[in-house]
Image (tube, helix red, strand yellow):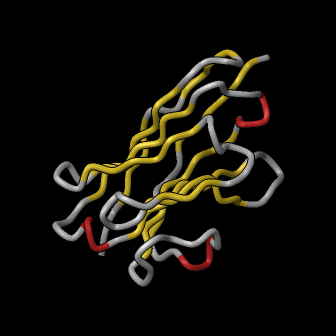
Amino acid sequence: QVQLVESGGGLVQAGGSLRLSCAASGRTFSSYAMAWFRQAPGKGRHFVAAVSRSGLSTSYSDSVKGRFTISRDNAQNTMYLQMNSLKPEDAAVYFCAADRRFYLGTQDKDDYDYWGQGTQVTVSS
């Protein structure tokens, strides 16, 4: 089992940057594919980016490709999301998620076994 805690959210102007972190408990962090999802008010939870167990493979939603970068540090049990060129439509609660089955996590939130509590990102125009 793994516990996930997100941090790094906040208020930023459009065009600005934020770096989210997801700290994981336990000694098996490298056994999990990891991902970021986001959920805006009144909307569903949507895939943002995923990183493989090793950190060598990544995938992104089309809406963030080229602006966001996902990474992980298995020695520190931490995953990151560097968000650049933020837009008002990026505002949401961002969740990190862990998956035991796949080497690189999927875009389907139902495939993920563990979730953090979320961190709020607000982007002012």
Q: What residue appears at the point 21 percent right and 70 percent down from the top-left corner? A: 28
Horizontal placement of 41 versus 3: left or right?
Answer: right
The residue closer to the viewer here, 27 or 85, is 85
Left or right of 41 on screen, residue 108: left
At which x and y percent is residue 68?
57, 39
121 lies above or below 75? above
Most foreground residue, 35 or 63: 63
Q: Quadrant of residue 24?
A: bottom left
Q: Is residue 38 left or right of residue 53?
A: right
Q: Nearer the viewer, residue 2 or 16?
A: 16
Give the quadrant of residue 34.
Answer: bottom left
Q: Position of residue 50 (x, y in %)?
A: 51, 59
Along the line of sight, which residue is nearer the eye, 118 or 80? 80
Give residue 58's position: percent from left, percent from top: 48, 58
Q: Quadrant of the N terminus?
A: bottom left
Residue 55, image x and y in percent? 35, 58
Residue drawn at the location 67% of the way across and 27% of the way down: 86
Judge whether 75 appears above or below 9 on screen: below
Residue at left 68%, top 41%? 92
